[in-house]
Image: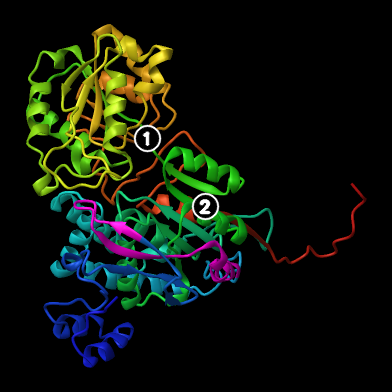
């Protein structure tokens, strides 16, 4: 692996960044063809010039005796080598987490200057990530490992940059704001504090290689924890480069660890190191296993079979069709918030909605990555699922259902045209069909159904029976309809109104599931405090003892 540098002068100036010359040195001295922090050039990674991903532990970057070769999802070339840590090499990571005390690296009563440090780091990182050459670097790197349109990739970088802006200056210490309540007598007062856990772990998926791990990582660090971060190996190169950027912005090397390894080895690390809390974003199956293995010391943002309900008031059909297309098929449907099922009021069935959705879906093409590889489900698996659904009485294929053509996507991944299948609402609710219909297919696929005016209770029953409750949308401006649906549903991030969507959550509102005490949020002060800190109460009782006090009788 190689690092891009303009000259030894720039290296020297980078070291002065933390002491106030950060912006001037980066702006005036960086060469136009390179980035100070980067060890790769996103567009030059290939089978003949593979990139490498290293591990960070106890303040230093390390390679490994074992390498995992990642295939280019568009052509199958082995283009990234990931240094994976085997079980017998876990000791440095276990030791690193064990060195962190339960009271954290900082807390409201200790090392308070570190709250200011992280406000400064956020300021510098937000400034740097906002530069066109840096945002383009990360957008292109995201596209290389998790193919999506440039606009979708750049949107991920934008949300990440805005998140960092939100926690500049004093905003980090405001996360640890405490409160006081007067006591019962002179000298007594109770104080509530947000307290870190100490050592923590973060495990994140492939579909948002920058946004999810960065937002959770910074939340953990803001609150005083020491995290070990594991990102899906297929996309971990993005976060490795981001961590290097954070180091340039003043992040202490020892404040976090970054590990690349397989799931079994990561599970062993968690069992041996015993982090006080583990944040997991990913599949429900793995989430439940971790919850058991770690005895509940987890926060989960697992998968969701996300629904959208179109109310009786038909309006803005063009706009609603476009949002449905974006929700179901942007990023090839590989969003945990993607529209999985559309409940369409009978009034919408007589509109041009479905034909317009079909037209929008068919304009997606591999050339601009508005449709692309599915990284966790093979083509055969998706086609098999579609065939089973089409065996349900009354079901029919609205559009799609066929593999992509004329491509070089390797067979370990999936390649499917944007697909929609209609299934009658009464068939969905049958016990023999419900589990199949509500199985999340993490790709460009959705179920569409129709309900009559007197069948809203069936729709709400279908939503109630779902086991995960992440995002939802109620597309209507009818206040009584909204009141009925919102009052009888639970999804943690629910959009309501004629412009409602299920995807595209920005950094300015809560994103996370509801209905589960283990549920994790992301992005907002409330989410950070919930996930990355716990409540501690300290009751001060300093006296004085009342004059002429005497020992009372035993009670």
Residue for point 53% across, 70% down: 105
Q: In the rendered structure, which disc, 2 or 1, sits on the residue that comes first in sequence?
A: 2
Label 1 packing within 10 angstroms: few (<14), some (14-19), many (20+): many
- Residue 484 vs residue 341, the one in the foreground: 341
Q: Residue 193 carries which label?
A: none
Secondary structure type for disc 2: helix
Residue 21 in the figure: left or right of residue 440: left
Indicate yes or no whether the magenta region holds residue 83: yes
- Residue 371 vs residue 20, the one in the foreground: 371
Is 284 rendered above or below residue 35? above
Instruction: Determine if residue 503 is in view.
Output: yes
Secondary structure type for disc 1: loop
Q: Report the magenta residues as a range.
A: 69-98
Q: Residue furthest top?
A: 454
Q: In which quarter of the image is residue 39?
A: bottom left
Is 288 rendered above or below residue 64? above
Residue at mark 2: 264
Name the mark nearer the viewer: 2 or 1.
2
Label 2 packing within 10 angstroms: few (<14), some (14-19), many (20+): few
Residue 482 in the figure: left or right of residue 32: right
Q: Quadrant of residue 429?
A: top left
Residue for point 33% across, 65% down: 81
Q: In which quarter of the image is residue 16?
A: bottom left
Residue 529 in the figure: left or right of residue 47: right
- Residue 8 vs residue 526, the one in the foreground: 8
Residue 251 in picture, x, y percent from top left: 38, 74
Residue 403 in picture, x, y percent from top left: 18, 34
Residue 510 in picture, x, y percent from top left: 35, 45
Q: Quadrant of the N terminus?
A: bottom left
Residue at mark 1: 304
Is 229 rendered above or below residue 310? below
């Amino acid at each position: 692996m190689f690092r891009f540098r303009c000259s030894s002068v720039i290296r020297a100036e980078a070291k002065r960044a933390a002491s106030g010359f950060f912006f001037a040195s980066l702006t005036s001295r960086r060469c136009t063809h390179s980035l100070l922090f980067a060890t790769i050039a996103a567009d030059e990674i290939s089978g003949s010039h593979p990139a490498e991903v290293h591990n960070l532990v106890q303040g230093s970057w390390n390679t490994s005796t074992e390498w995992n070769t990642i295939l280019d999802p568009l052509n199958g070339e082995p283009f990234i080598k990931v240094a994976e840590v085997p079980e017998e090499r876990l000791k440095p990571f276990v030791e690193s987490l064990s060195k962190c005390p339960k009271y954290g690296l900082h807390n409201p009563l200790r090392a308070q200057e570190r709250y200011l440090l992280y406000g400064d780091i956020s300021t510098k990182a937000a400034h740097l990530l906002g530069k066109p050459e840096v945002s383009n670097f990360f957008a292109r790197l995201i596209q290389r490992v998790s193919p999506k349109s440039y606009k979708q990739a750049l949107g991920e970088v934008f949300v990440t940059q805005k998140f960092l802006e939100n926690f500049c200056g004093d905003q980090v210490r405001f996360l640890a704001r405490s409160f006081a309540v007067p006591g019962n007598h002179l000298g007594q007062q109770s104080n509530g504090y947000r307290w870190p856990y100490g050592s923590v772990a973060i495990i994140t998926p492939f579909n948002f290689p920058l946004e999810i791990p960065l937002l959770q990582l910074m939340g953990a660090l803001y609150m005083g924890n020491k995290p070990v971060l594991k990102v899906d190996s297929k996309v971990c190169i993005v976060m490795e480069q981001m961590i290097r950027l954070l180091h340039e912005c003043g992040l202490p090397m020892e404040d976090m660890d970054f590990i690349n390894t397989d799931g079994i080895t990561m599970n062993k690390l968690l069992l041996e190191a015993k982090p006080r809390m583990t944040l997991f974003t990913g599949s429900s199956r793995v989430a439940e296993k971790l919850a058991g293995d770690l005895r509940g010391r987890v926060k989960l943002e697992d998968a969701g079979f996300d629904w959208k309900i179109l109310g009786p008031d038909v309006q803005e059909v063009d706009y609603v069709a476009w949002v449905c297309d974006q929700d179901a098929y942007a990023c090839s449907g590989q969003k945990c918030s993607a529209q999985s099922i559309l409940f369409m009021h009978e009034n919408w069935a007589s509109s041009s909605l479905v034909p317009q959705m079909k037209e929008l879906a068919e304009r997606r093409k591999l050339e601009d990555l508005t449709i692309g590889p599915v990284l966790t489900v093979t083509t055969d698996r998706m086609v098999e699922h579609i065939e089973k659904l089409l065996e349900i009485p009354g079901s029919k294929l609205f559009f799609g259902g066929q593999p992509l053509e004329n491509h070089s996507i390797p067979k370990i991944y999936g390649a499917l045209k944007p697909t929609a299948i209609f299934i009658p609402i009464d068939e969905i609710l049958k016990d023999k069909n419900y589990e199949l219909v509500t199985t999340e297919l993490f790709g460009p696929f959705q179920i569409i159904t129709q309900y009559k005016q007197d069948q809203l209770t069936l729709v709400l029953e279908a939503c109630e029976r779902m086991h995960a409750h992440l995002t939802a949308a109620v597309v209507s401006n009818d206040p009584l309809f909204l009141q009925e649906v919102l009052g009888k549903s639970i999804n943690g991030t629910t959009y309501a109104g004629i412009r409602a969507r299920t995807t595209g959550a920005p950094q300015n509102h809560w994103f996370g599931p509801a209905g589960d005490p283990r549920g994790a949020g992301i992005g907002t002060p409330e989410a950070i405090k919930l996930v990355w800190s716990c409540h501690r109460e300290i009751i001060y009782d300093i006296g004085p003892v009342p004059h002429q006090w005497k020992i009372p009788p035993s009670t």
